Amino acid sequence: MAMTDEHDALAAPASVDVLEGDAGDFFALLKPRVMSLVVFTALVGLLMAPGEIHPVLGFIAILSIAVGAGASGALNMWYDADIDILMGRTAKRPIPAGRISADTTLAFGMFLSVFSVATLGLLVNWLSAGLLAFTIFFYAVVYTMWLKRSTPQNIVIGGAAGAFPPIIGWACVTNSISLESIVLFAIIFLWTPAHFWALALFKSEDYGRAGIPMLPNVAGERTTKHQIVLYAVLTALCGVVPTVMGFAGMVYGVFAAILGAVFVWYAVQVWRMPDGDSKMVPAKKMFAYSLVYLFCIFTALMVGALVTKFTGMAV
Amino acid sequence: MNQTDLTEKQKKARRSRNVALGIVLAVLAVMFYVVTIIKIGPGIFDRVM
């Protein structure tokens, strides 16, 4: 596979007319699906944090975090336009499709980054704003510009960017970082490699064409499958830590243990899949379940925290 | 001065962007007004003239 650590701005469509792009295209630059995960996990961090925040300020905090995440998505699309055009999954994005220019996207992403951080700082607190600024920097610069094209561990380290939102949500309420919020971070951080490598297995041709050194393309399917099982086990173990630490109840603990066991089971199915399997059904199932897993874990944490807040019972 | 004639598709896209921008600006104005009331409250009138 030809690896790329060069950013080729000329490979993206040049001199496209911004006038072709409508509001929906600008919204697409924000990566709304990724944003929905960010909003959800940040909301859970905000609701689980001890203390109170005015509901309107809480809403603005989540909105700012969402816009900041969207801004980093736009900066990612600006930088990656040269490789997005080579992959079926990303070729229809606004820049490679020629509906919005790369320059406009850069300006859009930069403006939203500054605006979201400033809003969060002025209206909520500057610790959460600083964390949001660091998250945008980590995703747009550390992950997109550096790690993504240079190492097969790209999404392991880069996954930190996607794991920060609950810490930011927590900091919005408490103006601090605590061990509990770091555990929420760790669940997403450990979940990311298993989730992305399942996708990378059945999209390896796409990544290979674009020269992205994803683990299956560089180290092979077998190594990737070992790593998926390893990270699935770590994720499942981390999923029950909130109960062990006492900030989630036994009901959550049992629920998380079952979800984690199923996550590991799916990982083992991927591990048992013969190398060179063209359909990759277990990998596709693992990818789909990984989304269900994270959603259910964070929903359970949120429900548990709300029940505890309103009734005093730990569930 | 050269004037570019927009196609129907470009005009439609521009209208869409304008409407979205208008909505965003209106929401921001309301949002900052509400937050000012929440953060400062009745104290907004208690200032030295």
Image (cartoon, coloured by chain):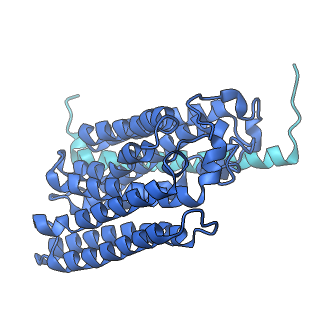
Image coordinates for residue A8, horizontal then vertical, percent: 65, 28
The residue under the point 42% across, 34% down is A142
Which lettered chain is shown in blue? A
Residue extending farthest to the top is B1
Q: Please tell me how many numbered marks the rendered image carries.
A: 0
Residue B22 lies, with reference to residue A201, above or below; the image says above
| Residue A57: x %, y % from top left | 31, 52
Residue found at x 26% / y 74%: A256
**Chain B, hue in figure:** cyan
Is residue A48 visible in the rendered image? The answer is: yes
- Percent from the top left, x then y, of residue A217? 55, 48
Q: Against A106, is A202 above or below?
A: below
Taking the image as shown, residue A249 lies to the left or right of residue A208, namely left
Residue B29 visible to the viewer: no
Asked whether A35 or A77 is in front, the reply is A77
Front residue of A308/A251: it is A251
Residue at 30% from the left image edge and 54% from the top image edge: A166
Q: The N terminus of chain A appears in which quarter of the rendering?
A: top right
Task: Give the answer, above or below, for where A92 lies relative to A142.
Answer: below
Q: Give the x, y percent position of residue A304.
A: 22, 74
Against B15, residue A243 (above or below) is below
Using residue A14 as the reference point, say whether residue A230 is left or right of it: left
Quadrant the C terminus of chain A occupies: bottom left
Quadrant in the picture for residue A121: top left
